[in-house]
Amino acid sequence: MSSCLSRIWPLFILASLLVSCDTPQKRAMRALSKAGIEPSASALLAAVVRQDAESLGWLLDVGVFTELRDADGRTPLRIAIENRDIPSVCELLEAKADVNATTSDGVSMLGVAVERGETAVVDQLLAAGSRTDGLMPDGEKILPWAIRNGRLHYVRAMMKSGADPHQKDRAGNPLLHIAMDCGRKDLTHSLIELGADPGGTNAAGESTIQVALRQGWLDEVPRLAAAGADPNQIGTDGRTLLDHAMAAGDRERVVLFLKIGADPNHRHPASEDGSALERAFLAKDLSFFRIFLDQGCKPPGGSWDAWLWKAYENRNPEAARLLLSHGAKAVLADSAGRSLAEVAALHGRGGFLKLLLDYGSPVGNALFDASARGDLDILSLLVVSGCPLNTTRGPSYETPLSVALRHRHDAVAALLVKHGADIKLSLPGGQPPLHLAIALGCPATVKALLDAGVDPNMPFNLPVSAAFIKLIKPGAMRSVLKYDKNFTPLMLAADAGVVASSTYLIRAGAKRNVWTRSYSMWPLNFASRRGDVPMMRLILGRDPKREDRHIEVRLSEQRARLFDAQGNELFSTKVSTGRKGFSTPTGEFVITNKNREWTSTIYHASMPYFQRLSCSDFGLHQGVVPGYPASHGCIRVPAGNAAKLFAMTEEGDRVRILP
């Protein structure tokens, strides 16, 4: 018996030792070996995918790596959560799988669990240290998503886990604003208690008070203001709560905002608008201003004179009338030293200017300003008010008439002349008003001066000053004014190119058949130098706008055609134009004189039926027409046709020469 025991005892001891060395890891290894599963991270990933909890447990027991990712970048824990495989989730969390691992799209484990409504998983993830600022599968942050989707249990759970109450959604909206937009007063209160900032704004720039008002939560406004919401915060449109309430005509809200600390004198540094108090006072309906007064509001600085300027700036004449009737004086000047009446005239504000004149405000330089601006309405008002028209202003000694002309305000200058401006006054530049009006292109003033009796042939004051010559367009007239004599207003008008001015001068008796002493230039020459077809026609006694016929010469065809006013062809002939080196110029010209017999002063050749173009050295005439360009620049017309064309045209007819 003892020998039997002696043989069995060592075997028992050995078996006991073997059992004591059989750890979970070893058992798991044997199970994996028996199942033919390799103890690897890829095997663990596969077990999770097929939701094989038993194999997953063996693999976790042997300590396989838990963070291997699939082709989509998901970890086993992420896959288990997506599959709602709670047992696998629990095992992976117990194995310390990374709860904050994300895929390339940034989506977090917690976000997936929240979306799927897995409360137990969410609680376990939070307990395991999952971050609460991750993303949902749709890319939104978890807390904003949970608030919008009514998952308030998750919101409270995350807040208890230390979630940041200052988080914002992907659009930039704070949690507090999201809760308010969702109509959750209770959550709004909780967020404020947890430290959310009531002074923040949402992505649209709205303050919490603005959101509360949009939600109709008037009772929440005092609470928000007490918690730190700014009652003077500027909205995205640059206006305050008071501004909006006033714009809506909501007197109840105006009172409410004043009680919670809204400042009626508040000015946003980036805004050019006045304060709410200023606008209330300057509005046509002064009821809001009375509310401000009832609440004890005071005007800044206490100067009602300054508020008269505000009334002007805000285009509120009724408020200005109220101020003036209560003793306000328009005595304060602007930064440029101008009185309110002068500024009103400068801006063309006739009604406001009339109001100031009714209360005896000084006019100052208003007449000069109106003349410079060209404001007929203001000028008429000042003239009717008896402002002197011929006063001068230093240091240039300008008059309102010279100011109007210098700025080319033709109608204004004409009005001044009609109401008694001195038509003989020598203006800056040393010339009479007529000459200045012509030079500056003011035909209405030219007519008014002529109607007032000014001589259309009035000579220039000599010598002509450099200041006046500078007004003239570069060209022949400048040289004539400098070095010649016997020039006339019509010559100046012809050079200026204003047909109306020349028309009025000719009607008033301006001489067309005079010429300058040295250069022998006629009024027609000045128009031709400018290539001014209407002006040349006018001086030649033709209607500058309506023509009976015109000639068209096409160089490429070597042909000339005569058309009537309706464009019907009356006559056609072949021609020969300038050869190489003597090309015929293209453009529009006027027949300025006609000679049945003419001999060229350049080539001493006979040129019958010569029709000179724009006072130049070429024209149409009878000559040899070989069928190609052969002239020295003139337009040769065959014998017979030259006589016919000569008989069918008149001085002043237009000639178009085309390539």
Image (spheres, helix red, strand yellow):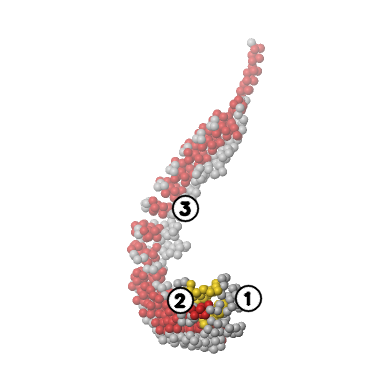
Comparing labels 3 and 2, the label whose residue is closer to the camera? 2
Q: Name the residue at 36% across, 75% down.
A: 354
Viewer-closest of 572 and 18: 572
Question: Residue tagged by mark 3?
Answer: 203
Q: Name the residue at 60% across, 75% down.
A: 626
Task: Give the alpha-carbon distance from disc 1 to disc 3, as whole Å.
Answer: 75 Å
Type of residue at label 3? Answer: Ala
Cβ atoms at labels 1 and 3 below 8 Å apart: no
Q: Position of residue 550 (x, y in %)?
A: 49, 75
Say whether residue 528 is visible: no
Type of residue at label 2? Answer: Asp
Viewer-closest of 536 and 583: 583
- Counting residues from the start of the chain, the first of labels 1 and 3 encountered is 3
Asked which secondary structure carries label 3, the reply is: loop
Q: Name the residue at 48% across, 48% down.
A: 169
Cβ atoms at labels 2 and 1 below 8 Å apart: no
Q: Residues within 10 Å of mark 2 (few under 14, many from 20)?
A: some
Comparing labels 1 and 3, the label whose residue is closer to the camera? 1
Asked which secondary structure carries label 1, the reply is: loop
Q: Quadrant of the C terminus?
A: bottom right
Asked which secondary structure carries label 2, the reply is: loop
Task: Give the alpha-carbon distance from disc 3 to disc 2, as whole Å.
Answer: 72 Å
- Counting residues from the start of the chain, the first of labels 2 and 1 encountered is 2
Q: Name the residue at 43% across, 79% down.
A: 444
Left or right: 640, with 360 as reference point: right
Q: Is residue 466 above or below residue 56?
A: below
Task: Give the alpha-carbon distance from disc 2 to disc 1, as whole Å.
Answer: 34 Å
Question: Residue tagged by mark 2?
Answer: 548
Type of residue at label 1? Answer: Gly
Question: Residue tagged by mark 1?
Answer: 581
